[in-house]
Image (cartoon, helix red, strand yellow):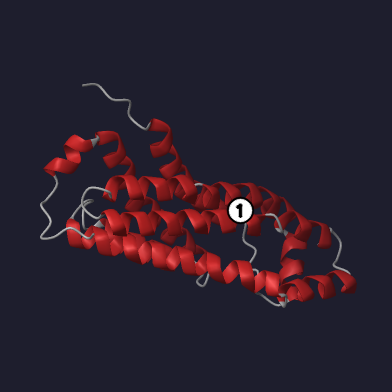
């Protein structure tokens, strides 16, 4: 029986990390928790990269939503509970990431060319210290971390995807976090992309490939 392959879903799975690689290359502004004056000064000095990076960041985090669907779909036979939990958390991280991305155009308005006004620094400082900032950023990070750990644990336990993808996903996530130099960050994003390719390939391979995968000692229910 012929079935339609999820080409769009597989494309979205790859589009996210690809956009992440390009985002890190074009947008060199630091993490948003950086001191308000320093952060806005970086944005003012690289407005074009930040503007393009905003679009790429939206693609990057937005693709976590179909990415979560893909994880749940691939893991549903061997690890249905873990796949559902991981998929939902990764998708939630994507939704929260899109909300965070809505602040980036506002930041551009606070950081015009030629210098940043003291009022703009004070306004962004208030945003950094607000419950809104922590109330979105922390759940987004927690969802991404727990979703990734659950996905990796299911992969290692069941072999639903090649087990070598697990360390790549973890290393890519850590190295591309923005806590390291630009070179390390870009390498991390490429590693994350490499770890995601088997997920897209399994989607296109269909259930036949899943049935031929290495048998798992037990199903994560």
x%, y% of residue 202? Answer: 27, 41
Q: Residue at x 39, y 51 (%)?
A: 193
Residue indicated by mark 1: 98
Name of the residue lying farthest toward the top: 2
Q: Residues within 10 Å of mark 1 (few under 14, many from 20)?
A: many
Q: Residue 90: x percent and y percent?
A: 44, 57
Residue 217 spot, x, y in % from top left? 10, 60
**Quick check: can you spot residue 214?**
yes
> Tag 1's secondary structure?
helix
- Which residue corresponds to the image point at 66% horizontal and 48% vertical from the top-left? 52
Rendered position, 8 above or below 162: above
User: Split into 4 quadrants, where in the image is the N terminus?
Assistant: top left
Q: Would you place residue 46 above or below residue 127 in this image?
A: above
Q: Is residue 123 left or right of residue 87?
A: right
Q: Nearer the viewer, residue 161 or 18?
A: 161
Can you tell which quarter of the image residue 210 is in?
top left
Evaluate whether residue 176 shows in this view.
Answer: no
Left or right, 186 with reference to 170:
right
Q: Which residue sits at x=37%, y=45%?
A: 70
Provide residue 42's location: percent of width, then percent of height. 72, 66
From the viewer's perspective, tell me whether residue 209 is left or right of residue 181.
left
| Residue situated in front as seen by the camera: 90 or 106 | 90
Which of the two residues, 21 or 88, is positioned nearer the viewer here?
88
């Amino acid at each position: 029986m012929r079935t339609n392959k999820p080409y769009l879903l597989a494309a979205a799975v790859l589009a996210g990390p690809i956009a992440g690689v390009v985002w890190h290359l074009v947008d060199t502004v630091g993490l948003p928790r950086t001191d308000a004056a320093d952060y806005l000064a970086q944005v003012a000095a690289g407005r074009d990269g930040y503007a393009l990076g905003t679009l790429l960041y939206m693609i990057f985090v937005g693709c976590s939503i179909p990415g979560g669907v893909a994880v749940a779909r691939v893991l549903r036979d061997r690890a249905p509970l873990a796949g559902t939990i991981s998929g939902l958390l990764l998708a939630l991280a994507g939704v929260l990431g899109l909300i965070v991305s809505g602040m980036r155009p506002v930041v551009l308005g606070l950081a015009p060319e030629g210098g940043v006004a003291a009022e703009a620094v004070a306004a962004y400082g208030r945003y950094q210290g607000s419950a809104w900032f922590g109330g979105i950023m922390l759940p987004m990070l927690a969802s991404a971390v727990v979703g990734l750990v659950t996905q990796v644990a299911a992969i290692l336990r069941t072999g639903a995807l090649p087990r070598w993808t697990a360390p790549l996903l973890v290393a890519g996530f850590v190295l591309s976090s923005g806590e390291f130099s630009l070179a390390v960050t870009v390498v991390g994003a490429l590693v994350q992309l490499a770890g995601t390719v088997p997920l897209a390939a399994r989607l296109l391979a269909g259930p036949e490939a899943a049935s031929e995968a290495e048998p798992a000692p037990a199903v994560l229910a």
